[in-house]
Image: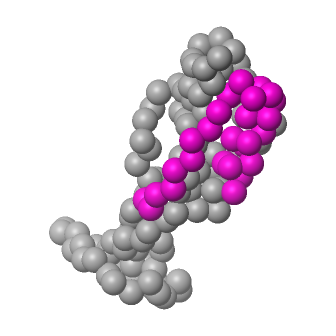
Amino acid sequence: MSIRMSTTPSKRFDEKTNDMRRRPPVKPSGDPNHIYITRKTNVESQTKTAEELLNNAFDEIFIHGMGASVNKALVFAMEVERKFGGSVKSDIQTSTVQCTDDIVSLLDLDQSETRHRSVSAVHVHLYRASS
């Protein structure tokens, strides 16, 4: 039993005969001062976590968001900055992240394809302002 893989340039696939499985994107870092925002993230609870990190453990935190969560990540970063009343500053960068999807045929389980797509991302560096 061999698995045939190919790369498809097409963005369309037949949903009746294929299943798409999205691979998780590569995270820039696994350090505890890196916070990843998704569509399901509760901003209020993450704000408390970020406050605890900045007050107790770290002088800087990094906030990352991709795709539909870019806006939520920016709102989250500005909320943390507002809570500290000017003692925390931010540096915002945007990027494009390459994501990979596996398209598996439901008819022939030995056949699969990979699809690469670009997703917008935002990276916010929050740090203590020097006095």
Whether residue 91 is visible to the viewer of this picture, yes or no, is yes
31 lies left or right of 90: left
**Residue 64, picture quadrant:** top right
- Exactly how many numbered labels are in the figure? 0
Quadrant (top left, top right, bottom left, bottom right) of the C terminus: top right
* Rendered residue at 71%/52% (across/down): 72
Residue 44 position in % (x across, y down)? 81, 36
40 lies left or right of 92: right
Residue 93 position in % (x across, y down)? 52, 50
- On whether residue 78 falls in the magenta region, the answer is yes
Position of residue 73 relative to residue 5, above or below, is above
Residue at the limit of the structure toward the front, as seen here = 131
Position of residue 31 relative to residue 27, above or below, is above
- On whether residue 43 falls in the magenta region, the answer is no
Please state which of residues 104 and 122 is positioned toward the viewer in this rendering: 122
Residue 121 position in % (x across, y down)? 53, 57
97 lies left or right of 113: right
Quadrant (top left, top right, bottom left, bottom right) of the N terminus: bottom left
Residue 102 position in % (x across, y down)? 39, 68
**Residue 124, picture quadrant:** top right
Whether residue 47 is visible to the viewer of this picture, yes or no, is no
Q: Which residues are magenta?
A: 71-97
66 lies left or right of 105: right
* Rendered residue at 22%/74% (across/down): 4
* Rendered residue at 57%/41% (across/down): 91
Residue at the limit of the structure toward the top, as seen here = 56
Residue at the limit of the structure toward the left, as seen here = 2
Colour scheme in use: one colour
* Rendered residue at 74%/42% (across/down): 78
Please state which of residues 80 and 69 is positioned toward the viewer in this rendering: 80
